[in-house]
Image: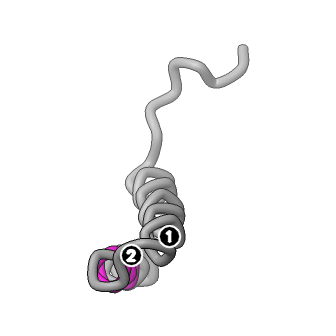
Amino acid sequence: MLNLFKPKSEKEKLEKKYKDLLSKAHKLSHSDRKASDQKMFEADEVLKRIEAL
């Protein structure tokens, strides 16, 4: 089967969260620089957690 029911690992969850945060930061960079910087900071923290695994 297509791994539909296979639970995601912690690393996979963090990678998805990292990509989502980067995407949001990019969209916000066009309108709200401060919010964009905050999302980039959050993404950096997630990346550090991924590297720790």
Look at 53% across and 63% down and name the residue there.
Answer: 23
- Cβ atoms under marks 1 and 2 closer than 8 Å: yes
Earlier in the chain: of badge 1 and badge 2, it is 1
Image quadrant for the N terminus?
A: top right
Question: Residue 24: horizontal and vertical position, in percent?
Answer: 45, 62
Question: Residue 31: horizontal and vertical position, in percent?
Answer: 42, 72
Boundaries of the magenta span? 36-44
Q: Which residue is mark 1?
A: 22
SS of the residue under disc 2: helix
| Residue 42 covered by magenta stretch | yes
Is disc 2 surrounded by few (<14), some (14 to 19) or many (20+) residues within 10 Å?
many
Along the horizontal axis of the image, is 2 left or right of 16? Answer: right
The total of numbered circles placed on residues is 2
How far apart marks 1 and 2 lie (CA) works out to 6 Å
Kindly tell me whether residue 53 is visible in this rendering: no
Q: Is residue 53 above or below residue 27?
A: below
Q: Which residue is mark 2?
A: 43
Picture quadrant where residue 46 is located: bottom left
Question: Residue 37: horizontal and vertical position, in percent?
Answer: 34, 85
Is disc 1 surrounded by few (<14), some (14 to 19) or many (20+) residues within 10 Å?
some
